[in-house]
Image (tube, rainbow, N blue to C red):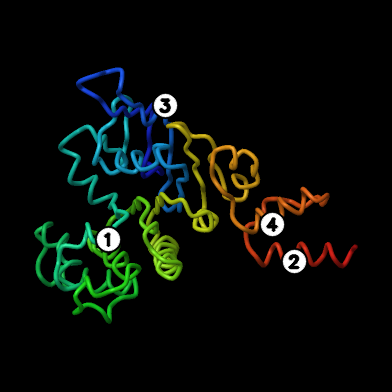
Amino acid sequence: MEKNIIKTEGLEFTYRNHHDEKKSIKALSDINLQIEKGQFVVVLGRNGSGKSTLSRLMNALMLPSMGVVLVKGMDTKDEKNLWEIRRTAGMVFQNPDNQIVGTIVEEDVAFGPENLGLPPAEIRNRVADALEAVGISEFKEHAPHLLSGGQKQRIAIAGILAMKPECIILDEATSMLDPVGRKEVMNVLKKLNRTEGITIIHITHHMDEAAAADRVVVINKGHIELDGKPEMVFSNVERIKELGLDVPQVTELLYELNKEGFDLPLNILDVDGAYELIRKLAENA
């Protein structure tokens, strides 16, 4: 049984300039990536690194220039797979206003299942389950445009959930939100991952969100630079900084202490762990 929900082999993508081939831009080069079912993966990279291009290739919104993208074993270049690929890997975008189509929350969430041609009773059940899963059942009869950014993004996620995907891909879906909205969305994603077993692929530039993942993939200039557990990736502080990225605040604190002569591990990402480490250090001083 295939354990990878998404797999890329020799993946390349070039934005073509048909008037001047010399001005074509290669966004991704030789991406070989395997994402297992049930993983929570964060993809990091500076603007222009290729991370958003990768997310769209995973959902067949774009097709590879070279290589292959397999979603649950289905080749995205095969048109007959398109509908099933979109059902398997749902996409949530940066601006929820671009994804919300209904004038009432429950109508918006029902849009996808209705297009699947499901019976009305099944649609109602899916809408209710999806709204409950993201914690906004009480807003089901509200107008989406009157809700907060975090609530709108949860509606967008509910609309994808109602399609019963096995994987949700989020392309900078928290970048327009305030800290409260970001926390709301991250709590929903962690819950869906842990209780529903849904694979999450989250493209972001927030390091604290990356620290909460099972795995972090860092892309730079169209190549995978780092790939591993968050504590392993972020312990490469100098390399991360060379790539124009930050590290979580806890890691930054330990890194700065080491510059002052301490010898602290950099693979601690949570505040409690860092506090305990520093407390012991003070006791032994």
| Measured Cα–Cα span from mark 2 to mark 3 | 42 Å
How many angstroms separate mark 1 from mark 2 (CA)? Answer: 40 Å
Callouts 2 and 3 close, C-beta under 8 Å: no
User: Cα distance, mark 3 to mark 1?
Assistant: 32 Å
Residue labelled with disc 2: 276
Badge 2 or badge 3: first in the primary sequence: 3
Image position of 179 with respect to 215: above or below: below
- Which amino acid type is marked by label 2? Glu
User: Residue, x 42% and y 26% (percent of image)?
Assistant: 30
Q: Is residue 154 above or below residue 48?
A: below
Secondary structure found at label 1: helix
Q: Quadrant of residue 70?
A: top left
Q: Secondary structure at mark 3?
A: strand
The local secondary structure at tag 4 comes to helix
Query: Is residue 248 rendered to the left or right of residue 45?
Result: right
**CA distance separating discs 3 and 4:** 35 Å
Label ID, residue 30:
3
The 10 Å Cα crowd at callout 2, few under 14, some 14 to 19, many 20 or more, is: few
Which amino acid lies under the numbered mark 1 shown in the image of this protein? Answer: Pro
Name the residue carrying label 1.
96
Are there few (<14), some (14-19), or many (20+) residues within 10 Å of tag 4? Answer: some
Whether pointer 3 and pointer 1 mark residues with C-beta atoms closer than 8 Å, the reply is no
Of the numbered discs in the image, which one, if any, rests on residue 253?
4
Q: Is tag 3's residue or tag 1's residue first in the polypeptide sequence?
A: 3
